């Protein structure tokens, strides 16, 4: 099958696949909690909140990942400060900072005449440009993500279902919330080069949504979500190679399609099982009819 093997003859494709797989593992772990806790808006806001940092790093000639990390951390920190000290709700704080950071990023981009060539990579990623240093950074990010998720697992579970019980058990739900926001920030920054600032939520949410259709336990959902994410990366890269489409958009689109296919498959399976199972009334009448017949 040359269509499948030919891309792997190039070194940059292998690095892109490996880097995308590492990103998929991060997003599978963090995305599971994002879906459970309903934090999709936070991930979207941090993704767009990276824009001013990345834009400024581009203008100053600094590493883009550094600018993305600084901007994302500033965004998540400001959200926490506004929530604790202000009278604004959580989603209102996120919405205001989201617009403020996006506006600042657009101002920086529009002020720099030399920025146009980097706009596409900024918004939609450039996974094919991943190098050895990027892979090392992603490997460290995977270790930090898995370690943090394992350390705070009980706190995350308790805080997700009842923060009061978490407090009673001494699990410190406030610390768990800070840790979870930190993981979301890390996942968004790690996914930046793969899918850019606009499409990062697709890779963060879609694999977890696909996995939750088939699993009930959180660790199993994380593992399956990571596997679905890796599959989406592979499909997206192959589609980009053969169809000449943007790699980041192809990966994000593949993840969404897998989520839709997973939900549809689960619905079909559930419907088939229900059709084969006897109706409760029939299940009661059948033994009675047999008794009367004897």
Image (cartoon, rainbow, N blue to C red):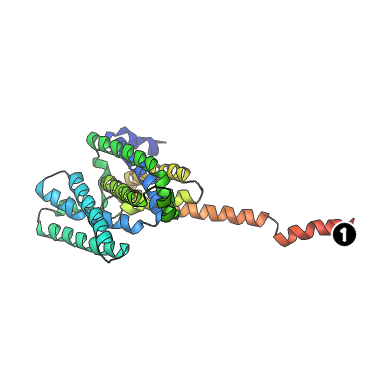
| Above or below for 206 versus 99 | above
* Residue 137 screen position, x and y as percent: 25, 37
- Residue 189 vs residue 260: left or right? left
The quadrant of the image that shows the C terminus is bottom right
Q: Nearer the viewer, residue 206 or 66?
A: 66
The quadrant of the image that shows the N terminus is top left
Camera sees residue 204: yes
The residue that mark 1 highlights is 292
- Residue 43 vs residue 56: left or right? right
Query: Which of the 4 quarters of the picture holds residue 149?
Result: top left
Query: Which of the 4 quarters of the picture holds residue 275?
Result: bottom right
* Residue 134 screen position, x and y as percent: 24, 38
Q: Nearer the viewer, residue 110 or 13?
A: 110
Camera sees residue 256: no
* Residue 184 screen position, x and y as percent: 32, 49
| Above or below for 97 versus 220 | below
Give the residue displayed 76% in from the left and 59% down from the top. 284
Q: Residues within 10 Å of mark 1 (few under 14, many from 20)?
A: few
Give the residue displayed 50% in from the left and 51% down from the top. 213
Disc 1 on helix, strand or loop?
A: helix
Give the residue displayed 23% in from the left and 61% down from the top. 97
């Amino acid at each position: 099958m040359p269509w499948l093997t030919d891309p792997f003859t190039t070194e940059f494709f292998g690095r892109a696949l490996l880097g995308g797989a590492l990103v998929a593992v991060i997003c599978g772990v963090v995305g599971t909690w994002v879906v459970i806790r309903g934090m999709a808006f936070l991930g979207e806001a941090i993704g767009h909140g990276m824009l001013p940092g990345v834009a400024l790093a581009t203008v100053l000639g600094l590493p883009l990942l550094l600018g993305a990390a600084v901007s994302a951390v500033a965004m998540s920190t400001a959200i926490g400060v506004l929530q604790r000290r202000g009278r604004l709700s959580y989603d209102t704080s996120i919405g205001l900072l989201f617009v403020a950071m996006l506006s600042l990023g657009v101002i920086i981009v529009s002020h720099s005449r030399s920025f146009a060539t980097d706009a596409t990579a900024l918004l939609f990623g450039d996974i094919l440009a991943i190098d050895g240093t990027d892979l090392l950074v992603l490997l460290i990010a995977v270790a930090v993500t898995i370690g943090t998720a394992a350390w705070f697992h009980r706190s995350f579970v308790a805080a997700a279902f009842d923060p009061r019980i978490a407090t009673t058990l001494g699990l410190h739900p406030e610390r768990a919330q800070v840790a979870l926001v930190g993981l979301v920030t890390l996942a968004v920054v790690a996914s930046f080069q793969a899918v850019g600032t606009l499409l990062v939520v697709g890779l963060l949410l879609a694999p977890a949504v696909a996995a939750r259709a088939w699993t009930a336990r959180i660790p199993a959902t994380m593992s399956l979500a990571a596997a679905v994410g890796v599959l989406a990366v592979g499909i997206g890269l192959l589609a980009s190679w053969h169809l000449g489409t943007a790699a980041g958009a192809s990966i994000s689109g593949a993840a969404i399609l897998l989520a839709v296919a997973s939900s549809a498959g689960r619905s079909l399976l559930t419907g088939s099982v229900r059709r084969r199972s006897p109706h409760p009334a029939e299940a009661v009448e059948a033994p009675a009819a047999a008794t009367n017949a004897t």
